[in-house]
Image (cartoon, helix red, strand yellow):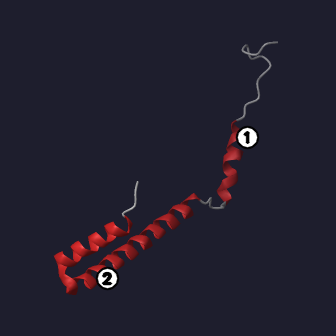
Amino acid sequence: MQSIGVPGLILILLVALILFGPKKLPELGRAFGRTLREFKEGTRELLKEEDDDDKPKPNASAAAPSAVVEAERVEPKKDDKRLPE
């Protein structure tokens, strides 16, 4: 993907100047700047929330799954016909 470059940027600014006039351009620039700033802040908040969700939260129930696994382990019986003797 190619960038616009200096000549393309100048052309866009000239077209904007012709369409909106010299009095409206500063207002449009401020509005664009505010919009861009709000977008960046929203993106940062979303990334921060995503990072917070990815971090494991320490709690007492973290050891519970291993206790459940230990309780479910079944010792084979000697008279079980499925076991080879």
Q: Which mark is residue 30?
A: 2
Left or right of 72, for residue 54? left
Q: Residue drawn 61% across and 60% down? A: 55
Q: Residue drawn 73% across and 31% down? A: 74
User: Which of the image's four quarters has the N terminus?
Assistant: bottom left
* 2 vs 1, front mark: 2
Q: Nearer the viewer, residue 3 or 76?
A: 3
Q: Is residue 74 above or below residue 45?
A: above
Which quadrant holds residue 70?
A: top right
Check disc 1 and report the residue beneath it.
Answer: 70
SS at badge 1? helix
SS at badge 2? helix
Q: Are marks 2 and 1 in contact (CB under 8 Å)?
A: no
Q: Nearer the viewer, residue 22 or 84?
A: 22
User: Which of the image's four quarters has the C terminus?
Assistant: top right
Which quadrant holds residue 60?
A: bottom right
Q: Residue drawn 69% across and 40% down? A: 69
- Inspect the image, locate mark 1, and give the three-letter code of the amino acid beneath it: Glu
